[in-house]
Structure formats: structure tokens, C-alpha cells
Amino acid sequence: MITDTKLLFAAIACLLHSNVVCQTFDIQVEEMFSNPEYLAINQTPDYLNLKGTLNSAFERAGFNVVNAKWAGQQLQKPKPAPNYQVLALEIFNVFDRAAAVDPSLNPIKRNQLIKLLKDAGICKELQHSFFQKEEIEKGILECISQGAFIVLPKNKIALSTKRTPPLVEDFVEVEWTPPTIYEFKFNYVYRSSLSCGQTIKEFYASLNDLADGVQIASVRFEQPQLSSMCKQQIINKCVSELMAKNHHEFKFQKSLGFKNLKSITIIGKDGNDCNGKSSHDLANDFSASILGLYNVVDRVNFDAFIEEQRNSMSGLFEDSDYIEAGRLTGAEGIVFVEANCMNKHTEIDISLSDTRSGSIQWSVHSENLDPHEIADRLIESIAD
């Protein structure tokens, strides 16, 4: 009887106190992470339409939410683009040999040439006739653009008088880097609620790297029968606590002899963030966000000066050389931006050097922050 009474009082206390008291939010972050290029969520309809609520919550947190099926396709290395120079050479050789056997084929109507090329097996790997014709047309256009074929009136095509075959240049395949994609997978148990209608009783989720399946974070929520937190509140709190648990760091240092410089130039050093974005691109993003604090000098003269110096110098181009270049091109300061990725953890270091003295005016070390947020925090820090 005493035990039952205690349970009753516990239930009443749970009902009267804040929802948080009797609810469990367990968020674990196994690996610190930067926002990926895409966050994949299965868009198949679910009973409580949690996918829609999750989409909105993660988008507000800065994620680019996409369909999980589409995201998986982005991790497949794309097929190399057709080399139409090679196809053009094959087409030229077929037409050239045919015309040598039967000179009346030169010139030839375009449709007849396409039929001739199909019969010769050009683009036979394409099963559909429409796609064969489309690719052959592109090869013919390459022959025309290189002067191997001549276009005549009445939609006729002839070999050039010199019968010079099209040039096939060395084909260099562009290195492909897969995008960084995380997947948020979830399942839940629902129940009825007096205040919310249908709500979540239990919610379990994980954040995984879609490329290798490694778990980055996990989410668990449970609430007892008498508690009545609604689904949108639950999802919003899960996402906000996930982002809070993921470590972000901003360290700012200002020199004792700080000078309020006005005109600066910004350059990116070597290195990439965890999304493969170069320090140069991050420097451009930072530059766009810092305009309210500094006058960013046009880089045209600076880049020209640097290129001239590179051509006249051998060995490593040091920070002091960039500082000197900034001074000679009219900038009072030069900002260096450098990014690195350590275990899916983006680190960006930024510093401002006085081009006259070479002294560092301020420096920033950040972890898992994008350049726009770094700029916002920097502006606040300098103002303080």
C-alpha cells in the first residue's frame, strides 16, 4: 500500500512539474563534426510526419537536407564524360574509307551519313536508336568544328579537301572527390496525448557518415504516459541538443599594441576543410562577411604582384613575402586563412598581420564553424 502511494505521488509530481523532469533526452556525440554538404533523411511518409518536422529543424540548424535515396547516388563516381574527339576520329575514318571505295558518297546527306555510321557500328553500345543518333550528331559536330568535315547546302556534308583527320588531344580525367554526406536515421513509438493528439513516446536516432556507415552521434528520447510533450517540441529539442553537444570553438586573441587597420587583403593558404573546400574559397567567404569591419582591397594588383614575384623567385614563398606584397599594393593589413580537417573536425585559423611592421594584430582559432559565423564572432570580439 505504501509503495502504491509513493508511485501515485511520483506520478502526480511528474504531471505537475515541468515536462523535462520526467522526460529523458540522451544525446551522444561520438565524433565532433562540421555541417556536411548534405544531410540525408528518408523522405518516405511516416505516421506522425516526423520527417517534415526533422527537415525543418535541421534546415534551421544550417543543414542542407536531401532525400536519402538521392544522396546515395551522389556517392557513386560519375561516369567520365564522352571524349567526342575520339568519336569524331572514328566517324571520320568510317566516312573517309567509304568515300575512298565509293567516291559518289562524298558529299553525302547528313541523314545518310548517320545511317552509314550506324551500319558501321558507331555508338552500337547505345541500345536505343535515338541515343545513337544523338551521340553520332555530336561526333559529326566535332568533325565540323575541327575542319575535318565541311557543311554544304541542302544539308550535305563533305570531307575537307585535305582530308585532315580531327585532332585527339590527351584526355586528362578530372579527379573526383565524393561529397560529404551524413544520414539521420530514426524510428519511434507513438501514443495518444490529451494536449497534443498523437505524440512521441520513444524516439531513437543516429547520425552516420553515409560513405562508410560510421556512427557520429546518437539520440534517445523517452517520456512516461503522464507526460505530454508534443512531437514538434521533442524534435526541436533533440536537434538543438545534438548541435549543442557537438563541440564548436572560437578562440580570439588581440595583440597588446592593437591597431585599428582599415584596408586589408585576404588570402587563403594551403589546406581544405572537412567538406573539401579550399582555404582559398573559405577566404573568399570570410572576405564577403568582413566588409562591415574592413575595407577589403581589390586583389587584382596583389595577385599580379605575387605572380611576378613567384616567377622571379625560387624556393618557398613565405608569409613575409605576402606581407610585403600587401604593403606594396596599398593594404595596411593582410589576413591569412588556413583550414585543416582532423577526424571529420574542421579547424580554421585566421590572423591579421600589419604590412608595415609585420606584427600580428589578432588571431582566431575556430573548430567546426563556417567563415560567416567566424566573421560575426570576430566583429563582436574586436568591438569588445
Image (spheres, rainbow, N blue to C red):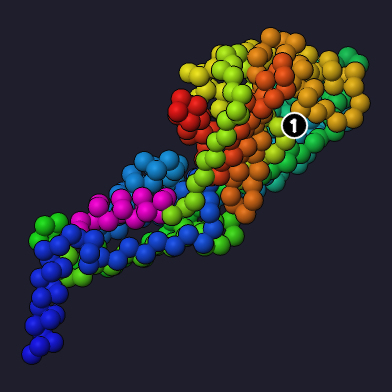
Q: Nearer the viewer, residue 277 or 115?
A: 277
The residue shown at (63%, 37%) is 349
The residue shown at (73%, 41%) is 175
The residue carrying mark 1 is 84
Which corner quadrant of the image does residue 19 belong to?
bottom left
* Residue 352 drawn at (x, y percent): 63, 26
Q: Compared with residue 8, is residue 169 higher up or lower down, i.e. above or below?
A: above
Q: Quadrant of the N terminus?
A: bottom left
Amino acid type at circle 1 is: Tyr
Q: Compared with residue 63, is residue 301 higher up or lower down, i.e. above or below?
A: above
Q: Nearer the viewer, residue 80 or 177?
A: 177
Which corner quadrant of the image does residue 158 belong to?
top right
Q: Main secondary structure of the magenta part?
A: helix
The residue shown at (25%, 52%) is 232
Q: Is residue 149 visible?
A: no
User: Magenta segment: does it hold 345?
Assistant: no
Give, as a single range, the part of the protein colored magenta.
Answer: 228-244
* Residue 122 drawn at (x, y percent): 75, 38
